[in-house]
Amino acid sequence: MKSEGLRIQRPAVIGAGTMGMGIVEVLAGNGFSVQVVELSQDLFNDALQKMDKRLLRRVEKGKMAAREREEILGRIRYVPAINNLDQVDLVIEAVVENLAVKQEVFKDLGACTSPDTILASNTSSLSITGIAAKTTRPERVLGLHFFNPVPRMALVEVVAGMATSPALVEAVSEWIRTLGKEPVKVKDVPGFLVNRVARPFHTEAYRIVQEGTAGKAQVDRIIRSAGFKMGPFELQDLIGIDINYAASVSVYEGYFHDPRFRPHFVQQRMVESGALGRKTGKGHYSYES
Amino acid sequence: MSRNIAVLGKGSLFTAVCRFLRERGFAPLTLEQLADHDVCAVVDVNPGVDGQKRQQLQLAEARISPQTPIYTSTLHRTATEIASWLSVPERVVGFSPLGLEQFPVLEVACPLQAEEVKGWDQHLRLAESWGKQVERVGDQPGLVFPRILSLLVNEAAFALSEGISSKEEIDTAMKKGTNFPFGPLEWADRVGIEQIAAVLEGMQREWGDDRYRPAPLLKKMIYAGYVGIAAGRGFYHYQDAKLGG
């Protein structure tokens, strides 16, 4: 497929959460001036401060020049609402994972931006087709699924909804490469590619433990011995057991309860207990600070 | 004590096990050579999808002493089922032959018939003498790593046949998006498609759960002989065919 020879000059990001600000950092780090929409200036300031802490740490470690940090910060501009966006050519939405909320955002984006503007969602679990349907130009809507932490993870899933222009998918993929990221084109299926294919790594590990085949630490040792950086349980503690459980349920529901994706009740018990991993000091393992 | 070990099986896994044993100062023997040699163990890497495994194990057992341990691949069948074919079932040690040359850990399983037999652990000394960190796990087809790998490969095979992404993209995505050491499809080519399918079919048979249903693409690849690097073709093409490793 011939590419459109995409020229992105004025990108914007909707939502200054962890994923949103990670994307902002990558864009600004690549020299783009980025407009960021968040519900209030205070929320935006907090998010920017968090990001700046990361940049400062890199400056202290000598991994970034002090001037580069200033330039990055200088390229990021707060915008109070979608209808205040100024001549944007690409918008990446990274608001809460809720279809109704995202659809509302895309309806506004469709109304407030030029017909050529590319509208992307960073959703990890919702249908791009369903989000795009709320705009008047679903052919210009696609998924750009970045991975956490965005500045460090190279992969971006470029998701084509049912109506997305194939040429646009090609062009955006090429542009993603210029950001130093690795694009992978995927179809709009539940969990897209990575979250779907990686599911058994986690859900099968729970079964192996629950049925008495091996202990958690044993599973992690065996899996590390096979070349993985982390076993499933230590990895879940890092990701967050609640996040991993939500992904499991979402893929399972998305495939209408195909047994291949069946989550395990112990995942739910862990979430109910509040042991969510490193962030709560306890998950599959204990993390005494 | 004899340094001879009878190795049962064929293909790249058989070659790899023989090489592994030779590097540790053991002499691998074939089933035929058993007639006039003593051995300290039998190592069987047949996945056991067909009747070969049973036949070879019974032939081997007739030619060895009752104390000689039999290490057998439990990728497709439980150690308990395999032990039930033998006259001295408590000598059986189930194990995973995958990554024998690479992984520091060796997964082993004890058949139900040997669970209350004192001294079964003695059979593990051999694996320890190979420099392995032995992990004893429950007796299920595919043990731990082969089972998780097989499910990852199965899902990747479904995704590929559904046209969700290309094979290269699937492998790239899993390496860059989740830090997998290999993409699932290239990993399957290394291990052998027939080993992956054996684990899935074994789990499906023992548990009766559709969760383990192999992707039709995997079965078709086996029919076509596209079983991985050793065959010159799996998910990918390999110019240097018949590497035997």
Image (cartoon, rainbow, N blue to C red):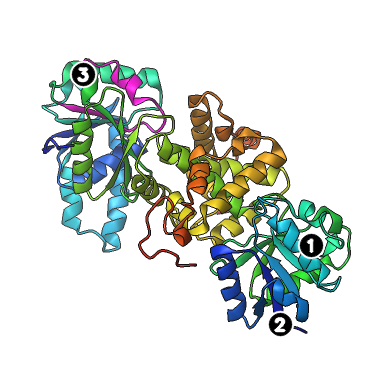
The residue that label 1 is drawn on is B58
Q: Amino acid at mark 1?
A: Gln
At horizontal 24% and vertical 20% (from top left) the residue drawn is A138
Please tell me which residue lies in front, A61 or A238.
Answer: A238
Residue A238 vs residue B5: left or right?
Answer: left
The residue that label 3 is drawn on is A137
Is residue A18 within the magenta segment?
no
Q: Nearer the viewer, mark 2 or mark 1?
A: 1
Residue B143: x, y in percent?
A: 66, 53
Please tell me which residue lies in front, A41 or B147.
Answer: B147
Please tell me which residue lies in front, B172 or A78.
Answer: B172
Determine the image quadrant of residue B38.
bottom right
Residue B50: x, y in percent?
A: 67, 51
Mark 2 vs 3: CB contact within 8 A = no
Q: Is residue B44 visible?
A: yes
Please tell me which residue lies in front, A146 or A42.
Answer: A146
Q: Amino acid at mark 2?
A: Arg
Task: Please provide the residue range marked out in magenta.
Answer: A117-136
Q: Is residue B38 visible?
A: no
Residue A286: x, y in percent?
A: 61, 51
Distance CA(mark 3)–CA(mark 1): 69 Å
Residue density around tag 2, few if under 14, some if 14–19, many if 20 or more, within 10 Å: some
- Mark 3 chain: A
Residue density around tag 3, few if under 14, some if 14–19, many if 20 or more, within 10 Å: some
Residue A58 vs residue B106: left or right?
Answer: left
Secondary element at tag 2: loop
Distance CA(mark 2)–CA(mark 1): 22 Å
The residue that label 2 is drawn on is B3
